[in-house]
Amino acid sequence: MPDRVGLAGIGDEAAPDLPGQLAALAELGWDRLELRSVDGTAVAAMEERAFAQAAEQILDAGITVVAVASRIGDWSRPATADFSWDLDELEVLARRCRVLGTRLVRIMSYPSGGLADADWKRLVHARVRELVHRAEDAGLVLAHENCAGWAGDDAERALELVEVVDSPALRLLFDTGNGVAHGYHAPDMLRELVDHVVHVHVKDAVSGPGGRVDYVLPGAGESGTAECLRLLARHGYDGTLSIEPHLHLRPHLRGQGADPGSGDPDAFVAYGRALERLLGHALHPVPATPTAREVT
């Protein structure tokens, strides 16, 4: 990982509106954006005029879009849902990613929707193969996240999916904070997956009573975020670290019938500053001052 690794953020974690998202990045001095929604509307669902205006604002601000976080295979679309939703979304994103100047699209691998394990696996393999085939034709790279879905919380399944599909158009997105919610230790999983990771979300969390998960500043939780950053550095990761604070916005709660909250610019900026400090400590630790006994 280079000394000045690329830093970005999922914009709607800062503000629902695009000017608010861009302002938060400007305050941090960052020039990379991961785009998920604008005014509460996913990138693929935006009206053409609204999307064109947003793309122009991003360009005028000198911001690079490093990835689009899609809804393909995510918590809102179980394996029993209509596959045409995902195919249609990918078709739209193929056009819009060209406008935005990015090739990277975040996907997941479908909650089961009640399917038996064997049927779930077959369906996920078939769907992801088809999605990747279309991504190849469009010049996109699909980045599968360790979150919802068949391969979301199991390194062996994630590696199997990459192997079965066997295409450079399928790679992995690793989120450092998802392990607390999904029941695994993130650094352990990352060690198995790191050679296939093309994009990283930075998040941290702590577990609470009754299975509750609370999200905290990077390095302040139980996720092993600093250890993940050191592991990525040792393996020469040269992609982007994209913050997803979840301090005030948790989109997955919408699927549970709860209020997902809204982005907060002050919290987003504070999170970005905390990541900068954590990178300094994790990658360039200050040597301990020797004691008098050690000097003599």
Image (cartoon, rainbow, N blue to C red):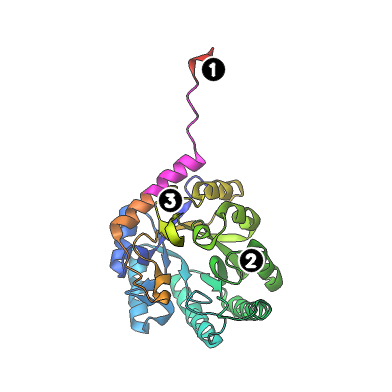
Q: Which mark is residue 294?
A: 1
Is residue 166 in view?
A: yes
- Residue 156 x, y percent position in the rendering: 67, 63
Reply yes or no: does residue 241 show up in magenta. Answer: no
- Quadrant for residue 38, please give it: bottom left
Give me the disc on residue 158.
2
Q: Say which mark, if any, is on residue 267.
A: none
Answer few, some or many: residues within 10 Å of disc 1's Cα (few below 14, many 20 plus, some between 14 and 19): few
| Residue type at numbered disc 2 | Ala
Report which residue position mark 3 lands on: 218
Mark 1 → mark 3, Cα distance in angstroms: 34 Å
Identify residue type, mark 3: Pro
Query: Identity of the amino acid at label 1?
Result: Glu
From the viewer's side, name the closer residue of 38 and 293.
293
Q: Residue at x 44, y 45 (%)?
A: 278
| Label 2 to label 1: alpha-carbon separation | 48 Å
The secondary element bearing badge 3 is classed as: loop
Looking at the rendering, in which quadrant would you find the C terminus? top right
Is 221 located above or below residue 97 in the figure? above
Q: Earlier in the sequence, mark 3 or mark 2?
A: 2
Disc 2 residue crowd, few under 14, some 14–19, many 20+, Cα 10 Å = many
